[in-house]
Image (spheres, coloured by chain):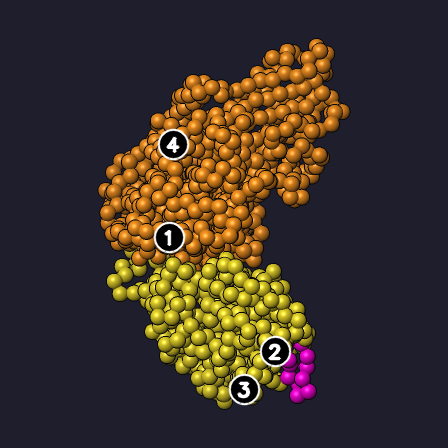
Chain colours: A orange, B yellow
Amino acid sequence: MSSPHSPGTHAEPGTHPGPAGTRSAGVPAEPAPAAVGRAVDRVDAPAKVTGRARYAAEFPYEDLAWAAFTYATVTRGRITAIDTAAASALPGVIAVITHLDAPRMKPSPKPNPIRSMESMATATSVDYLNTPEVHWNGQPVAVVVAEDPETAAHAAESVAVTYEVLPHSADFAAEERHAVPQRNSVIQHASGTKGDADAALAAAPVSVDLRFTTPRHHHNALEPHATTAVWDGGRLTVHDGTQNIHWLRSQLATKFDVPVGDVRVLAPFVGGGFGGKSMVWPGTILTALAARVTGRPVRAALTREGVYRSVGGRQPSVQRVAIGAERDGGLTALIHTSTAPMGKVGGAPEQITSVARHMYGAEHIRHRQYTLGLDTLSTTNMRAPGESIGSFAMEAAVDELAYELGLDPVELRLRNEPSSNPIDGKPFAHRQLTECFANGASLFGWPARSFEPRSMREGSSLVGWGTAAAYHPAWQLPANVTVRLDARGRALVRCAFHEMGMGTATAQSQIAADALGVPFEAVTVEYGDSGLPTGPGAGGSAQTASVASSLLEACEKLKKSIGTPREGESYAQLLARTGRDHAEAVVGSETRVGKRVGQVRFTAKYLREQRRWMKAACGAHFCEVRVDADTGEARVTRWVAVFDVGRVVNAKTAASQLRGGIVMGIGQALTEQTLLDPRTGRIMNPSLSEYHVPVHADVPRIDVSWLDDPDPTMPLGIVGVGEVGITGVAGAVANALHHATGRRLRDLPLTLEKLL
Amino acid sequence: MRPFAYVSARDVESAVEAVAEHPGARFLGGGTNLVDLMREGVERPRTVVDISRLPLTGIEELPDGGLRIGALVRNSRLAADPLVRSRCPVLAQAVLNGASGQLRNMATVGGNLLQRTRCPYFYDTASRCNKREPGAGCDAMEGFSRSAAVLGTSGECIAAHPSDMCVALAALDAVVEVRSVRGTRRVPFGELHRLPGGTPHIETALDGDELITAVELPPLPLAARSRYRKVRDRASYAFALVSVAAALEVRDGAVADVRLALGGVGAKPWRAHEAEALLRGAPAVEESFRRAADAEFAAAEGRSAPTGMPDSRRAADADGQGARAGNEFKIELGRRTVVAVLRRLADEGSGA
C-alpha cells in the first residue's frame, strides 16, 4: 500500500509571518512523478519531532502574563457574593476579574446557519463574566491574571464564591419525558418518512424492536485548549488551538466590538480537535478579555479538568431501532428514533438517525430525533456526530435481525444494499459498500466463522467475530486559495486551513504538485493564519476536498495566465523564457461583499449538487474480540476494515486517520463515558486516569485498506476520511461480543459487569 | 497548587526531625500520588520533606531467608528484582499491573503503601467527602460508586484502597518498619491500614511524623507458587475493579497451605482470612474454591441503584448512570476471580 518516499527538506509550514518558501533552487525540469496517491511523509514531521512546531501556548511574548479560571460548583444559580481579596493579595497576581468589574462584551450571535455560518461557532448563550447567573456546574465565574501560571492557578482556587442556588435539572433520566421533536434545518434532516413503517413493522413476519443507549463522551485531544491573546491598541492577535480560524475571528470581533480585519487568529498547529475545538468556548474569550483588562499579553492553558468543565462533549442518547423483514431477509420496515439532551444554554443536536436514511433498502422508513435541554454545559460535535452513535444502534440491530433470520450478518447486509438512496431514491454519487464487505470478509477470513454464538472458545477465552458497516456523508465548504508559481519552479499555496495532525498541508502539497507539474518538494503551503485567504473549518471530513476544489481551480487559472508551454517545456520554464519572475492566481474574494457573494454562489451550487447526488464515504468493519470466561473482560484482538473513500491523496496519513477513527471507536465501544452526576450536573471523571480512552495495550493490529476509486462528483474524486473510520466500530464490537458470549449488550460502554 | 516549604533531607535522622518540627509536613518520595493530590487541592501540606535521596534503596536477603525492601525502592526496580521474582512472583506481578511504566519508574514502595483512594468524590474538592473533610458527608453513597469498596466499608465512607502492591504484601504477611524521633517500630501489614469506621480520614496506624523505612517479607516458601490477577476496564493504566493475590500449595489433592488477599473491593488491602481458613485442608477443587470465595464475600455490601433512581433500563444508562447503578457486581466478580486464580494456581503454578 505504501511506497517509501522522503520529502527531503520541505519548508516548515506554519511559520508566519515571514518569507514564504525557503527551498533552494535547482529543481529539475523533467516531469515529476504523480504525488497524489503516494504514501508521502508529512511535511511538518521534522518540525513536530524536533519541537520547532509551535502550538497556541508556546508562542513567546515579552511581558507575558498567565490566566487561570475559577469554575462554578453549582448546577444553576446566581452569584450573591464573590470574595477576591485573598486571591488579589497573593504576590504576583495582576488582576482578578469577575462579573462585578469585567468590561461589557457584546453577546455572541445566536447560531443560525442561514444568517451566517460564523454564528454556528457560538458555544453557549451565556455572557461570561457579564452576568451573575450560573448556568452549568463548571461555568467560569472569575479570571485571575498573574505573573506565572502557578500563581494564577493558586489565586483562581482562592476566589470564594457564594451562590443562591436556583431550581435545576441535569438528570437525563428524569427529564427524558420532556423531550420534543427536533426541527429539520438546512444542515440536518432530524426526521423523515417513506411509506408507513409502523404498519409494515407490525405486519413483518420477522422483526426486532430494540432500545440502545450511549453515554456522554469527551474528545480528549492530546493538546488541552490553550489561548495566547495580545492587544495592540484596538487590534487583537490570538493564538488558539482552533479548528475554525475564520469563525473564531468573526466571533471575537463581535464579542469585543472591533472590525473583523483588526483580529488576527493564528493556529499553525492544533494538537487534535475531534470537534472539541470547532466552537468558541469561554476560555478563549476570557483570555482575550484578560489581555484587554491588563494590557498585557495573556496566556491560558486549560488543565485537563478545565477542558471538561468549560468545553462541551458528545450528547448521550437513548435510541430505538426497529426493523421488520421478510423471511428471506428483505427489509420491509426500518424505524430509528433518538432522544438526546443538550444544554439549556446551547448545543449541537447530532444527526443520530441519519444512517436510517442511507444504509438499507427498506420499503418503509421512519426516523425522528427528539431533544431536550438540561442545566449543563452545551453539548458539541465530536468525531462523526450522529453517525458515530447512530451507527452503533443501527448496526447492532441489523446483527440481531440476522440472528433472528438465521442469516449471516454480511449476507443480510448484501441482500439489502440499495441501488439508490433509500429515503428519497436519489442516486448515489459513488457507493461500493458491497465491494468493501467482499474484500473485508476475505481479508479477515470471515467465511471460516461459525454462526453459533459461544462456538469459538479458546482456552479460557470466548472468541467472537463481528462485522458492521461504516458510513459518513461527504460535505464541502467554501475555500479561498491563492497559488503562485515562480520562474525557478517553486510553488506557493496559501489558504487559512487547519493542521490538527491529519496531514492537510501534506495532502494539499501533493495536489498542487500534480496540478502544476512540479515536484512535491517544490511546493510550500502556508496555512493556519487568518491573514491568509479564508479557509474552510476543519470539520465534517470536508477540509481536504474543500481546499482541493479551490486549489485545482486556482492552478488552472494560473496555468492559463502563464500561457501555453512549448513541447517539453514546463510552466516555470515558460515564465523564465518570457522574462516573468512569477505568476499568481486567486480563487475567492476577501472583501466583505465578495465573501458574501462567494458564499451564496457556493451554497447554491452545493445545494444543487446535494439535491442531485447522495454523497458519502462507507466501509466494512470486521473484528475479533476475546472475552475472559471468568471475569467478562473483553479485549479487541484483531481488526480489518475496508473503506470506499474515493481517491486517497496520501496513503500514509489517510491510513492513520482511518485507523485513529477505529481506535477512538474501540474506546467508545468498551470504555469511554463521561460521568455527569445527575444530582449536580458535575462531571466526576474529568481526567485521563478516570475517563478511559484506549491505551496501547487495548489496540490490536488494525488492517485498513480502501478501494481507491475516485468519486466522480467530488474534486479529484476525494471523499473525506476523518470520520468514517469511527462509524460502525462500536456496533462491530457489540456484535462480536454477542458472537463470543451469546449476550446482547445495548448500552455503551460494554463494560464487564454487563456480561456477568 | 498552594505554595509550600521544601526541605531536602540528607538522612533518615534529619528527615524525621524535619517532619516533627513542621506540623502538617508530608514526606515526598516518588511524588506520583502526593504531587497529583496537591495539584488537585486535596493535599495541602505546608511543608514537603523530600526523602528521595535517602539511602533506603536496597533489596536484601535476611539471614532467615526473608527479604528486606528499602522504602525508596522504585516500583520498576522491585518488579525486576530476581529474588522478588523467584520467591514471590505475586509481588512482582502486582507491581507490574499497577500504573504505567513512567509512574513505576518514579513510585516508591513506601509511597505505594500510603497511596490514597481514587474515589471521584474524594478527588473533587467541590464534593462532600468525610475522608477529606471529617463530618462533611459523603456524596459517593448515592453517587458513582463503581470504584467503591464492598468489604470493610462504613456508613461514613465506601472508598476502596487503590494499591496493587499492597494486596500482594497483605497476602505475604509483610512487616513494615517505621521510624520517628521516638525510635523505630515494626507494624504487621494487616495492622497498617485502618478501616474507615467513623473516622475515614485516619487511614493508617502511623503517626504523622513516622517515616516508613522498609518492608520486610518473612520467609514463605509457599510464595514461590503465587499469582496476581487484576481485573480492570482496560489492559493497562486503570485501577482494579477486582484483584486477587494468591499463593497455593497443594499436597495429595488437598490444600496444604494458602494465602489470599483482595484488591479493588476492600476499604483496605483485604486479606481473605475466612477463605483461607476454609481452604486449608480442603480438596483443591473448584467447589472448595467457590465455597471459600462465597464465605469471604458473605459480609460484602454492594450498592445497587439508590432509592429514587429510575430503573436502570431507562435513560439512566445513557448519561453515565449505568455506572451510577453501583458496585454490586464486584461481589460476583470477586468470587469468580478468586476461583479463577486458585484454579489456575492448582493447575499451572505461578506463571513466573
Using the image, name the chain to which the residue with label 2 belongs: B
Q: Amino acid at mark 4?
A: Ser
Asked whether A686 or B93 is in front, the reply is: A686
Quarter where residue A514 is shown: top right
- Quarter of the image with the C terminus of chain A in it: bottom left
In the image, which disc is placed on residue A83?
1
A223 displayed left or right of A346: right
- Indicate the position of residue A390 as horizontal and vertical percent values: 38, 45
Q: Amino acid at mark 1?
A: Asp
Mark 3 highlights which residue?
B257
Real-space CA distance between mark 2 and mark 1, rounded to the nearest whole angstrom: 47 Å
Residue at the image position 53 percent from the left and 62 percent from the top:
B4
Magenta span includes A581: no
Mark 4 highlights which residue?
A119
**Residue B23 in view, yes or no:** yes
Question: Disc 2 on helix, strand or loop?
Answer: strand
Using the image, name the chain to which the residue with label 1 belongs: A
Quarter where residue A695 is shown: bottom right
Which is more N-terminal, label 2 or label 3? 2
**Residue B164 in view, yes or no:** no
Quarter where residue A46 is shown: top right
Please report contact status of discs 1 and 3: CB closer than 8 Å, yes or no: no
Q: Amino acid at mark 2?
A: Ala
Disc 2 versus disc 1: nearer the observer: 1
